[in-house]
Every structure is written in structure tokens, then in C-alpha cells.
Image (cartoon, coloured by chain):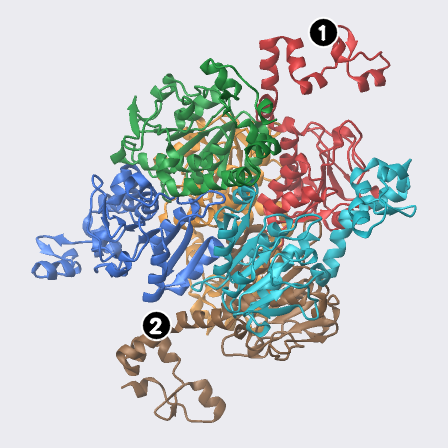
Chain colours: A blue, B green, C orange, D red, E cyan, F brown
């Protein structure tokens, strides 16, 4: 799903840079003789990588920030000087955001609230009519000014900056998302059908880690903690 | 302007393939493991070339049709097997359109109505939720089912196919379009200011061809004919 | 050797699509204005990756199928929309094969018979004059209709489909294959010469795993089992 | 047709570098760690350009020679350092040929015998098992040692060098060639059918130049001269 | 020679960005995580195109300015978003120069002094340690602050900006330049040797245009004018 | 720092191929019609990979040698036929070096003297005016003829071959190097400041491995050994 969301983020951002959608009226890739928009992508994980593939493809000027120099190196090897890789820190994020026409926030920390990397103060100093897309909105968002929206009313404006914060972004391309989800899950479904759930979970630790509730017990520690139920390990139920 | 329109056509088409915009819910570039959408571009002129740059960049499967084999050769040299070049005739247009998820119509014949290359019958047999973008709508459109729309209400549906036929497409990215227009016209404006209009038109046949009315006379033959005025040649007034 | 076989598979497939070799008479890469052939590659391991490099390079339309979404992602990052990545299952294999002009079967499961992914029924419904190349023929082949052939008589025809199933494909480019093999083995040879075989095997578990027979004992379990000899572990003989 | 022949030339050359076809047993693109074959293309016209697209795509080391520095510049802009462009003269042709594993001769002078750019002496000093493909064989060939062959018996060997000199190379991929020919000629056929031959020839000087015989007169000067008939201009018969 | 000078200009500029050569100590292509230098190329003719190939190749962020939108379109088609194409005017030149780390001036107007596109005022506001390379120095230079230098003492500093203005830049790579010059002139030399100079000049108007002095008469009008000699047309002497 | 050194090595090598710097006077990337220089890169680690990115970008003909076929495969997947990958052994190194115009030596074995892969005998048989750049000079160099130099006097000549052996190459681009170093170390600095050194070293084994001296004890075994001090493990001091 992160792949779909990453690619859609740029497409949605480009669409909302149009004047009639509240944006500043620039074409993402420019045209020969007219500069392209500057797309800043925060986070070079799955979301960020797919966002940058799309932004590069649409002809934007692209800056990607991440804290992993190794990840930046891999992207540099593949994309060369079609992208600008920048080590992420408070200063470099601010510099990039203030120069951006479109910012994609794609920093997700598994099982934790997304860090607020872009502050309200930065937003207020961005270009008028710029667009931000918060792909981390399901985990609280990585812009201080974000709150979740829907496909019906996908955007709101703060300090002249269009915020696109649709919570279920992949839902817009349901057909593509369904196939992507199928590809990721069909193997597990077949294993469950063929072996029964106990054997399937024993054979595959990743599947076992996904077990939340069994025989009336909560088997996922963080959930048990959050909801005040006693936690029972999955292993103890697979006997 | 054709450059802006060509690039925007794909961006608009991608946006309207989303479910909430009436489309079939596919992501233009797909994701790894899920096929990309098939974008068919009719006409490999300026509009078509910029549309294909964008479609290729967004990761679509792209077929471009044109009647000039020389033009197809040039595109093949630059894009190689990232695009599929097809010689355009009634049969090949029909084959491509019926297999398409998005069709960009970009065939413009200067000073003439655009030919209706895609018939109502083809439209009715297209995939449900497919999108067509008619970049030739200012000259009557190259889809039989097209009629002009606006940015406020950009689309309508015929036989399950979403039609995007905004008459002034570049208006959506006014900032980019203005700079592009400036680049194309500033030289003429400087010449007019420096030399006076008569000398400027004498020195530049392209500028002279653009003269429509002078000293109360219509100097553009097609306009004179169409409106029933006597035609006076531009040369006779430049003395 | 898999690299050589993968690259040769496309070259051999292209040659046998020629009319005089029994194929349908299409040029793999097409020419501008005429569609390229559709090459379907089943399996994205070493064989499949090298086959797709070659097929992309020759200008074909390429679809690659694999069960690993991670592997498809890596290929998508490098090849972008020059290839079509599809998650492999019975349905998607059938769809791809029936639309193909050339199918490369490159699914190898180490130490096991190759799975029969393409059935006789699929073969019978393929295009007339299509070509299949079975790179897994040394392990039984991944087409139900395959049987091993030689460089002297490399092909046979089943239901109008040309089968290229040469058992020792790299033998055709002996010079390249020899250097490739040298590169892979020279390090081991030097270790054996420098340290003696016992020490060399102790120092390198991969080399040790390759030991089949020593001091009259069979030290490779699968071989011992298959031939009815007692199995003796390599470790027990390295003293 | 030149496009088909140019692309096929490399494919045929690669196939005949295989040991069983008489070649030196090298894989055109090599594999990682083993050098690719050196493909030398003489002439950067349509044949040469399509040959080099294919050779580059298959991973060969490619040198292209031509007398037009402008043409070399265009190719350098598109292919960059994936090819080596060399100004063609007797010395540079000899240097390149002696280092080559595969030589494609694609120098055609319209209406004249192809120049013998590669001499018998050069052939005799080439690597043993090298391959030459003479795409100019229909006009006499550009290798001194060439003579026309057929798809049934496509090659012969001179001084250890395999000669592939099939006169009708595009015939091997009849399907692709037919579509390519259709694309190039259909416009003329439609004009002849719509307007009658006289008007069609009056409207199109290229078509008129192609007229050989009309009303019992030879209208093509070179043919009239060669066969001893009186020459009558096409214009005089179109009245 | 313009090709050599264009490519060398970037190489020389990169070298002089090093600290020990007076530059600001930045690596042209940056490294992953650290921004690349911004190279601004003024003029997209032969010099500019070769400079941009090199700058793109070295991984710089590249902006190219020109007054021909058609030329910018061609470059955009080939280089896509690896370069930024900007329509050249006083404002856009100033904006680009002030943001640049390296400026290549490559605007040459045949037979005229190069225009002073970069003023002293712009130079004084450039970054400290930036480098400018004036490829038009042989025609007076396109920086107001330029004066010709030699390979022995190639640079001087004005307002903290390193100026590289070597008059005979290609002399540094004499071997490459000699071959390039040979390729461009050998055809003329052969024609002169084969036909005698009169016939050779009659057959080739370009060669004739190059005649400066014959039979004691000045045959090049601009030279005659400049030096106060009577002008005699080449044609009148070729009789 | 290896990234900076790898990229600078090619830039420095290109500059010293100029005639006025003692080189043979060739332009690294050649120009259309004139062959590019042959750059040989020994070692495909971080130094070698960045050197090859730059050499490819500058348009050179590039050969890279390494003992890891896996590494060569990865590079082949990304760079395709823009580079020539060769398995490294005494013979292949000699063949490549003797044909080279520029050799980059980038073989570093952590904590050991660099191996002398290029012998004095090879150097003496290289082309006159060729250049070698020894990136391993800090560890003794990988050319038998190397000795460390400085930015003030960066080169010396042995047997007609220019040696560039600056010990602190990244110092030339101090600004880029400082940012690169910051990116690599800032995380450690923050950890030390936030947690105190003991906890920081306990939490991060890589940081702990970097401890050389603590509480008056040498905690790095190789250093203790080399300098004759008693060795105390870091762990024993972190209590």
C-alpha cells in the first residue's frame, strides 16, 4: 500500500498545484524554457522512493531527504543527478521546505506516531499556493498542521498552503490497490487454507507476528497494553 | 501552449482515472507486480510528444500513433522500448483505443477542424471507467463524443467513458503558461517597441502573417472570407 | 552459467522467431511504426534478470513474472516502465503466455525438478509460430511439452509453437562461458592448491558443501540417498 | 526495409558468433566479469543507426564509423558513452575491423555499387571466428570478399571469418517487414486510388520520380540508358 | 573545436572549484547527502551543448539558458529533468548567475564581438569562490570582467570570483583537438589535392567562402574592409 | 570520504591528462568522431564505484576490475554496457593497465597495507603521458611506484607516466567533504551528547569499536600492539 500511496502522492500534489484546486498554478514538470516545480520528499523509505520515481518521471526538480546516508547512496546510484539527495536534519528540512512548491511527507516509524518534521512556523513561511501531501496522516501526520481528510473533501488551506491529507489514499485507485494487496497476502491465505492456521503460523514467524486475537486472548502485546487486556503470547496458543 | 496542454493532459487523465473522479480506479504507473495503465496517444506532434514524455515518466505503458513514419522514427531513437510506436490508420486507432485505459487526442490541423478519429462506436466499446482527454477541443475535438467543458466542471461521461475536454487547459497552470507565452512572444514585443509596427512586420514574415486588421482593413484572408469583409493584403498597407 | 543461459535464451528466441527457423516471422524489437514482439519471462532470478536485460535491450515489449514482490520491486526501480512486472500465479501466467510471441522459462528450484508452470493446454492456445525457450530443461523443464535437445537439432514444434530446449545452452558460446566459469571457480582452485583440500574445505563452508565423494565415501546426502550408498558427513573426513 | 535489415543484422551476427554456427563462441553482450564482443558498424545511415540501437541494447561494445561528423554528433548526443564514434577513413576502418568480433557493413550509396571498404587483406587479418554481415549485398556488398547468400544457406567462411550475406534479409521476419512496407506505401496507394495515377503523380514529386514505364515509354533515365531504350520524361506524359 | 572547448570548460571549471586553485572547495557532483554544485551554462549552441553533456555527466545541477525555445525543446527531449532549461533574458541570466557555483559563458555570434551578458555588477554579487569560464574569450568574452589568459597562468580573481579565460582552450588536449580538426578538414584537403584549388572552390561554396587572399587580392570582404584593402570577389579569380 | 576521493580521482586524472600538466593531451570524453580516453578502475568498492560514476558521466570508455563477481553483477545491472566489467587477476590487470590512458587505483583493505597491484614493470610499459591516480596512497598505495604528494605539488613522473598521489585528496573540496563528514558523524555526536560516552558506546558496537584510548588505557588492540602498550578491552572500561 505504501507503494500506491507514494506514487499517488505526487499525482495528487501535481493536481492540486493547479489554480482551480487552490494551488499556485504551476505545472510540475514545467515546459522547456520555464522552470519545473521543486518537489521535496521527506523520507526515502518505500513511500519516498515511489514518490521520487513519479516526481522524477513527471519532470520535477526533486530533493529527497533522509537520515540514512546508505539509503541516499543507493538512490544516487540509480537516479544520479536527476535527484538531489540531502542528509536530513532540522536545518536542511527547513531550507528545502521553504524553497519547495510541493512537499511530500513520507516518514513512518512502524508502530509509533509520525514525527512532526515540518512545523507550523515553516508552513507559514512557505510559498503562497504551495502544496503539502501528508502520506503519514494515518499515524498522525508529519506536518504539524495536518489533520485527516477524505476523497470527497481532500484538502484544506493553512497560511496559503494547500494540505492534502487523505487518510486512505490508495482507496482512490481501488483496482490497482486491490491487486497490490492480493499479491502481498495471497501466499498467506494459501498457507492458511492448506495447512490450517496453527501450522501456518508456526511455519512463518511474520504471519505469527500478525496474530492479534486467538481463543479469546489478545496475542499482540502493544494492543493488549493499549486496551487494558491481559497479554497472552501467540506461541502459548499454537501448541 | 501546446507543450503545457500536452503535459497537463496526462496529469489530468491520471487524476480522473481515480475512483472518486469517475474513473476505473487504476494508478497510471501501476506498482511493481500490478500492471500499469495503457495510455494511447493519437498524434505525435508537439501535444503528443509532451504527453508521451509525461506518460512515460509516470510509468504508464504507452502507445503513440501517427501518420508520419519519420516522426515515429525520431521518437523511437529517443525513447526506445519505453514506448510503442504505431502507424496510424482506422484499424490501428480502433485496436489501440479499445485496449486503452486513457486516450489522449492531440491531432491538430492548423486552421481546420480536428478530424474525428475516435468514433462514437469506438467509445461505446471502450473499457468501463476509461478516460479520454481531448486536447483538440478548441478546434472541435478529435473524439466524436466531445464537447467543450471548463475547469469548474471539467468532465462528463458517455457510455461509461469519462471525457475531459476543458477548452483552456493551460489556464489551470497559469503561472507556467504565462512564462511559456512570454518566452514565445517577448521577441516580437521588443521588435514592435524598438522598430515600430511597420518595420517590425516587414522584417519578420511570421509576424506579418499574424496581422489580422490594420487601418480598418481585414488583412487575414480566411477571416475576411469567413466574415464577409473585403480582404486587403498586409503588404499593401506596410508601404 | 545462469547468466550466459539467460542472455542466450533471448538471442536464441529472437533467431527462431525468423520464418526460416519455423517462427512467425517477427523482429523482436519491431521497427518504428510496427509493434515489437511481446517477450514473457517467467521467473526473475539470475536467468530471468539476464534474459530481461537482453530483451529490453533488443527493444521487445517485456513482461516478467515472479512470486517475490520484493524482487519485482528491485527490477522496477532499475528498469522502470521499460518492463511490465506481474505477480506470478496460474491466472497471470496463462494471460501472459497466451499474449506472448516469445516465452522464456527460467524457474529453477535448486535440487528439485522445475515446476511445470506452462501446461500443454496453454501451449495449444498460444499464437501460431510463437517460440518458447526452456532454460530449466536441465532440471526437467518448466513447460509441460519440453524435452531436451542439442545444438545440432535445437528445436521441435508442438501445436505450432517452436520449442528451443537445448540442454547445454552455454556451450554455444564456449569462450564466454569458459571465462565466466573461470571467474567463479579460480578462487577455489587457488585455495585448494595453496592449502591442500582439507584445510580449504574447512575454511570455506560453500566449498565443503560441494564435496560429493571422499576416501571412497559419499559425502553428499541427496546423492547417497538417490544412489543407495551410505552417507558419511564431510566433516567426519576432514579430521 | 533498411530499418529491419539494420536490426536483423546484429541479431544474425550474434547468432553466428555461436560455436555451432562457425563463430568464435562469444556472447555478444558478455556477462559481468567477461568482456562483451566488439561490434564495429561501418556507416551511420538508417541501416547503421538501427544496427547500433540493437548492438547497444544487447550489451556489446560498439564502434560506429561514418564520414559525416554531424551524424556522429547526433548519435553521440543520444547514445553518449554507450558508443564510440569514429571518423571513417581507410586507417580507422582497418583499426576497427582488426579489433572487431562482429562487423556490420551498412554503407549504401543510392543508385551506385557499394564501396568495398573492407578489403580481402583486412579480412585475412581479422580474428579467427569473427563474423561479418554485409547489409549492402544487394548493391554488390561493402566487403571485398562478399557474395550473396540465401536464408537456406546464409553463410560462408573466408580466411576463418564467417560471412553472412543474405540478399533479402527482411524476408526472415516477413510479418514485421510487411507491416513496415505497408506503412511506407499505403499513403501512395490511397492517393492513386482516390485521384487516379496522373493527378497523384502531379501532386507528389517523390511518387513521380518513382515512375519507370508509362504508355509504353521508359520514363526513368538511368533505366532507359542501361537498357538502350529511348527516354521520355514523366512530365511529358502526365499532360 | 567548439566541442572540445565546451567539454573542457566544465572540466576546467570543476578543477578550479578546488580550494588550492582558489575556488570555494566544492565537488561538482557533490556526494550522496551533500548537494551538487549548480552549473549555469549561458548559450545552448555547440559549446553549450557539449558543456552541458559534461556537467550532467559529472553529476552537477545544471541550468542552461538560451534565446531559442526550439533549441531548449530539443535539449529537454534528450536530457529530460536532468537539466533545467530557462529562456534567456537579462533577469533570468542574473537570477541564474547569482545562484551559480560555476558559470560557463558560451555565447558566440559568428564574426561579431561576443555580447557582455554577465556584467561586472553581477560578478560582484556572485558567491565567494565561484568560478566563471569564458569560452567566448577569443571574440572578446561574454563576461564584462574577462580578459584572455594562457595555460601557464589560466586564472585571475575579480571580486572573489575565479575567472578561467584561456584563449586557446583546446590546446590543452592537443591530441584530441588535432584529431577533431583533421576530421573536419581532411575532406577539404583531399579535394584541394585531387582537383586543384580552383575546381575545389568552385565545387564547394563553403570552401570558397573560406578564401581570404588569392593572387595578391583580398577576397574576404570583412577583412578587406577592416584592413583597408580593396575587395575582390573570389568568383572573379576562379575563372 | 571514500566517495569524495573516488569522484575527485577522475576529475584530477582528467585535469592531468592535459598537456600543460604533463599528460598526453587527451580529453577524457573525446568528442564525436574522436575516441574517448580509456579509464581503468581497479577495485569496485566505494572508491571505485564513485570513480566509475564520474568516468562514465564524463564520457570515458571505462573498464572496472574486481575480484567479486557479485559486485560486478550489481554494477552491470545499473550501468549496462556503459562500462566493461572484468574479473581481476594479474593478467587482466596488466592487459587493462597497458591499454589505459588513466588508471584509478582504489583497492583498500581495511587495516592493512594496500596490495601493489600495478608493478613498476607495468608502469614502464604504459602509454607515454598516461596518468595514474592512487586513492590508496594513505595506506601505502596500490602502485609500486607511488609515494604520497600534496595539493601544492600533486604529481611526479615515473617512466613518462604522471602519478597523482595526493594523500588528503578530499581536502581540495573542503566544503563538500565537511558536509559529507558531518552527515556520517553527527548521529554519533548527538548520541555522545545525549547519553554520555559510556552509554553511547554500550548502545552502539560500531562506536565502541572506534574507541582508541580511555582512562589512560589503549583500547584498540592493533594500536596497542604497534606501539608496545598493554591492551585493555573497551568493554572492561564501560562498566
| For residue F219, above or below residue A219 | below
Q: Is residue C103 visible?
A: no
The x, y position of residue D108, in whole percent, is 74, 33
| For residue F15, above or below residue D129 | below
* Residue located at (25% from left, 35% from top): B20
Dividing the picture into quadrants, the one containing residue F135 is bottom right
The x, y position of residue D69, in whole percent, is 71, 44
Q: Mark 1 points at which residue?
A: D239
E59 displayed left or right of A127 = right
- In which quadrant is the N terminus of chain D drawn? top right
**Between tags 1 and 2, which lies in front?**
1
Q: How far apart are marks 1 and 2 (CA)?
A: 88 Å
| Residue placed most toward the observer, D48 or E230 | E230
The x, y position of residue B42, in whole percent, is 46, 27
Near mark 2 (Cα within 10 A), the count class, few <14, some 14-19 or many ≥20, is few
| Residue placed most toward the observer, E145 or C99 | E145
> Please, what secondary structure does the residue beneath circle 2 have?
helix
* Residue located at (20% from left, 39% from top): A152
Contact, mark 1 vs mark 2 (Cβ under 8 Å): no
Q: Is residue E55 visible?
A: yes
* Residue located at (58% from left, 54% from top): E117
Q: Mark 2 points at which residue?
A: F187
The x, y position of residue B100, in whole percent, is 39, 29
Near mark 1 (Cα within 10 A), the count class, few <14, some 14-19 or many ≥20, is few
Dividing the picture into quadrants, the one containing residue E22 is bottom right
Amino acid at each position: 500500500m505504501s507503494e500506491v500511496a507514494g506514487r499517488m502522492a505526487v499525482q495528487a500534489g501535481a493536481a492540486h498545484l493547479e489554480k482551480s484546486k487552490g494551488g499556485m498554478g504551476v505545472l510540475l514538470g514545467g515546459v522547456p524554457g520555464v522552470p519545473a516545480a521543486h518537489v521535496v520528499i521527506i523520507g526515502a523509505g518505500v513511500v519516498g522512493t515511489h514518490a521520487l520515481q513519479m516526481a522524477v518521471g513527471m519532470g520535477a526538480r526533486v530533493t529527497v531527504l533522509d537520515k540514512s546516508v546508505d539509503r541516499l547512496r543507493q538512490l544516487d546510484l540509480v537516479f544520479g543527478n536527476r535527484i538531489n539527495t540531502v542528509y536530513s536534519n532540522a536545518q536542511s528540512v527547513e531550507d528545502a521546505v521553504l524553497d519547495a512548491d510541493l512537499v511530500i511527507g513520507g516518514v513512518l516509524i512502524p508502530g509509533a506516531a509520525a514525527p512532526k518534521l515540518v512545523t507550523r512556523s515553516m508552513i507559514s513561511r512557505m510559498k503562497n499556493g504551495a502544496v503539502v501531501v501528508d502520506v503519514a496522516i494515518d499515524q498522525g501526520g508529519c506536518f504539524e498542521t495536518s489533520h485527516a481528510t477524505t476523497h470527497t473533501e481532500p484538502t484544506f488551506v493553512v497560511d496559503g498552503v494547500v494540505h492534502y491529507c487523505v487518510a486512505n489514499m490508495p482507496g482512490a485507485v481501488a483496482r490497482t490497490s486491490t491487486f497490490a494487496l492480493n499479491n502481498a497476502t495471497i501466499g498467506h491465505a494459501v498457507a492458511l487454507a492448506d495447512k490450517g492456521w496453527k501450522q501456518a503460523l508456526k511455519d512463518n514467524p511474520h504471519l505469527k507476528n500478525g496474530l492479534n486475537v486467538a481463543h479469546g486472548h489478545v496475542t499482540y502485546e502493544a494492543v493488549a497494553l493499549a486496551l487494558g487486556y491481559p497479554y497472552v503470547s501467540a506461541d502459548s496458543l499454537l501448541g
